[in-house]
Image: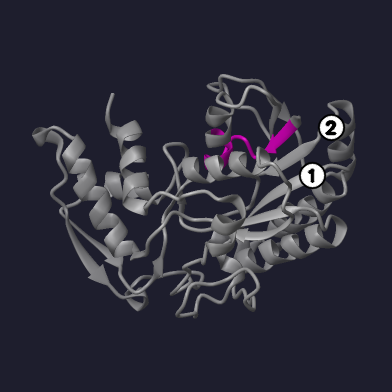
Amino acid sequence: MNILITGCNGQLGNEMRVLSAQYPQHNYFFADIMTLPETDVPVYILDITQQDDVNTFVQEHHIDLIVNCAAYTQVDKAEEDEPTAMRINADAVQWLGIAGCKVIHISTDYVFSGKEYIPCKEDDPVAPNTAYGRTKLIGEQKLMEVNPQAIILRTAWLYSSFGNNFVKTMLRLGIEREQLGVVFDQIGTPTYAADLAQAIFHIINAPEWHAGVYHFTNEGVCSWYDFTIAIHQLANTLLPESKQIHCRVQPILSSAYAYKTPRPHYSVLDKSKYKQTFQQDIPYWTEALDRCLRLLLIP
């Protein structure tokens, strides 16, 4: 197949690029709004918010499948500039959906209210309370309206050895500070983007195409506080004694942190449908974190 991967400069897009080498039976077209000099594969310039540009690219390169890793993910900025978030998270998804090929689209736990107390299933009521969540939900709806055979993968708490993310921030702050406060009343599941990329390739190479909405994160549950403790503890097993992290991490309430935009208090996703449909085991979150840290910390 000829596969177009949008948003290739992001965390997931970069993981797709790395993993694609294991699946040489396909031809890949990595695209983003701009190129980066350090990439080891050609990056095509493509503005997915322009319908004509999308159609032209798909036709010229005979694209069979689009994996949409592009998104406006800055939760706070989306509140200030919802029209831009809407163009990228919703309108562009519609253009990809009507381009005439299969689509795998990445969505988010933010389509839910974040007030649940049991893991969210794919058909549970959605109730986003942020501009980011609203635009992502509208993107899902537009895609399914124009392309009912699409696959939507909702994920949460994404991190990677690429880009900026929570894991890298906690490593840096752990080194810079003697004490750090991290919220303990927001519960979810960290997701290593490399494992999400593996799931996408598992879907691509499945014997049958199973359209619909699915949830994918790593296994397990934790708070941001627990996540931070694990980051520091696992990092110290990999770092020499002279560089180990000795920061004291304190649990704090969300109310003590100055969020500009509300965060979900509970965003655990039920992955039963994905596991039953695609027959794939999913790594536990601490095992996945260890693999990522080894890439970041071991020369």
Q: Amino acid at mark 2?
A: Phe
Percent position (x, y) of residue 293? Answer: 31, 39
Residue receiving disc 2: 57
Please tell me whether residue 222 is drawn above or below residue 125 in the rendered image. Answer: above
Span colored in magenta: 3-14
Return the residue nearer the eye: 86 or 41: 41
Residue at position x 63%, y 22% in the image = 24
> Which quarter of the image is occupied by the N terminus?
top right
Q: Report helix, strand or loop for mark 1.
A: strand
Along the horizontal axis of the image, is 136 left or right of 147? left
Q: Along the horizontal axis of the image, is 150 left or right of 193?
A: right
Q: Is residue 13 one of those drawn in magenta?
A: yes
| Front residue of 75 and 203 | 203
For the point 85% across and 62% down, the residue is 145
Q: Is residue 263 above or below residue 28?
A: below
x 77%, y 43%: residue = 48
Q: Position of residue 5 (x, y in %)?
A: 68, 36
Residue marked by disc 1: 102
Q: Earlier in the sequence, mark 2 or mark 1?
A: 2
Check residue 10 in the rendering and tell me which mark sits there, or answer none: none
Closer to viewer: mark 2 or mark 1: 1
Q: How is the image coloured?
A: one colour
* Amino acid type for the residue under numbered disc 1: Lys
In the rendering, at what x and y percent does residue 36 appear? 59, 26
Mark 2 to mark 1: distance in Å? 15 Å
Quadrant of the image containing the C terminus: top left
| Residue 242 magenta-highlighted | no
